[in-house]
Image (cartoon, helix red, strand yellow):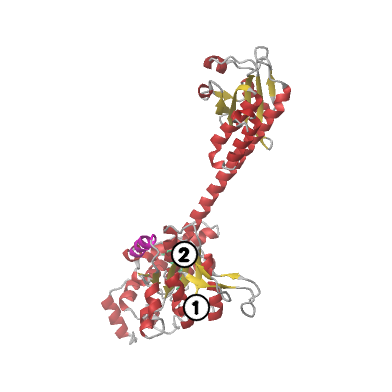
Amino acid sequence: MKERKKSEDPRLTFLNNISSLVTSVSDLDRLLELIIESATEVMGARASSLLLLDKKKEKLYFQAATGDKKDDVKKFEVSLGKGIAGYVAKTGKPLLVEDVEKGSVWDKKISESIGFDTKSIACVPMKIGEEVIGVVEIIDREDGKPIRSGDMDILMAFANLAASAIMKATEYKKMVAENVGLKSQLDERYQIVGESSEIKKVIADAIKVANSKSTVLIEGESGTGKELIARLIHRSGPRRDKAFVIVNCGALPETLLEAELFGHERGSFTGALYKKIGLFETADGGTIFLDEIGEMSQTMQVKLLRVLQESTFNRIGSSVPITVDVRVISATNKDLSKRTKEGKFREDLFYRINVIQLKMPALRERREDIALLAEYFLLEYSGDRGLKKMEISSEAMKVMLSYDWPGNVRELENAIERAVVMGDGNPIMVSDLPIGKTDGGFDGGVEVGMTLRDAQDLFKKEFLKKTLAYTHGNRKKAAEIMEIQRTYLSRLISEFGLRF
Ligand SMILES: Nc1ncnc2c1ncn2[C@@H]1O[C@H](COP(=O)(O)OP(=O)(O)OP(=O)(O)O)[C@@H](O)[C@H]1O
Ligand SMILES: [Mg+2]
């Protein structure tokens, strides 16, 4: 059989080339070059070029060119409205000039300066919708015959092809940019705020362990940011583009938790109407975050242990083992080692999930972060409501700085949110904060007939009681808030016979 040479059928060459490249929009330059190379070949032209319009500058630039002088021509630019290409770009209408010497629009500057002896030019616009984005032109035919109007349709088809390639590439770029934007927005949402050495250490450790697959146990009181740290580990490591799956082990009864984690086959138990993919499968390649792992039942602990040991499990009702590659991060606000010693948590599982430990510090152990977090949440919540920048009064800040925050960062976040939504306005006052409130309003208890001194004493006594109740009897803190000496406070306490 005779070997087929590519040049035998230019249309076939064109199709082969274009179809292999048309899908790879990332290489737009090459695709455009290929389109006009094919156009030159199919139309038997001496040279061709593709110019893109820069609307702001009102200029056309050579994006791709073929022919002997293709590198020289790329140095030129064409003003919108000038010459054949400029005219076509401006009017959006195709133009065929069979003899350039006779036409008036032709600007021979380019041809002359590159030493290209041009006879005829066909030029068509590239459009996206109604908008002209550039032009494609061919110059002369190899066989010396003039370009004919019948050739214009073919040239138009090439121009359309180039235009749609450009449009797709622009869409693609926009999509990529939007995706990046979304991702950084997400990252921003899970930002960990804090400058204290305690939080910085946890963050540094989290980033350090991100690249390994070792199990991590995050301990810490409620609301300290355990989930945030787990997310940080996930997105700082090689699994960042895969799923981060959260399972709250305390929220579901045992059988439901098992179905959630491992999935089930259809009909495997009453109510299993459909096949269900478990969360371990969903997290394949990524990370599973087992929140409140201390709440897991003994039976589930055994099942989990098997997955951790063998990376294998079965859907409920199936004997086919499923193998997954999942990184396991667990969290607990219980003292898990104590529970293990008490026999409430399996020792073998405890060691499996506890290869690396991270301990989230309580907010009261890193008070220097309180102001920072308060400002951060203030910006977030007032921003959410489209409010102008809000401030926190110095009294309110003082109260926040000395409060113990048993609910940690979550409580602080809620306090600020409430102050923004329910508070009396800007700046945020102590009364806007839902913390340290004592029962019953203080009306001063003063009555007409009292001496000023008695009234003052009564006021002082109630005021001390209120502040001390708020600091849980902590005299040092109370004195700081009231800006008095601690020794003076002690004297007042005994003077008024207060029990603190
Ligand atoms: N350092 C921090 N910077 C910004 N936001 C934080 C920080 N720590 C916690 N938060 C916010 O506080 C809230 C509680 O955090 P998270 O859910 O991570 O805590 P948790 O330890 O998992 O709590 P729980 O034990 O109650 O589940 C979240 O809204 C989180 O965004
Ligand atoms: Mg949590």
Mark linked to residue 325: 2
Q: Position of residue 221 (x, y in %)?
A: 40, 74
Magenta residues (range):
201-211
**Cα–Cα span, label 2 and label 1:** 24 Å
> Residue 434 in magenta?
no
Q: Where does residue 234 sit, x and y in percent of width and height?
A: 44, 62
Is residue 485 among what the camera can see?
yes
Residue toward you, 80 or 170: 170
Secondary structure that dominates the magenta span: helix
Q: Give me the residue at 39% from left, 61% from top.
A: 210
Horizontal arrangement in the rendering, residue 159 relative to residue 381 (left or right): right
Q: Is residue 292 among the parts visible in the rendering?
A: no
Q: Residue furthest front?
A: 1
Q: Which residue is mark 1?
A: 250
Give the residue type that dot 2 points to: Asp
* Circle 2 crowding by C-alpha within 10 Å: few under 14, some 14–19, many from 20: some
Which residue is more in the foreground, 426 or 209? 209
Residue in the picture at 53% in, 15% down = 113
The quadrant in which residue 237 appears is: bottom left
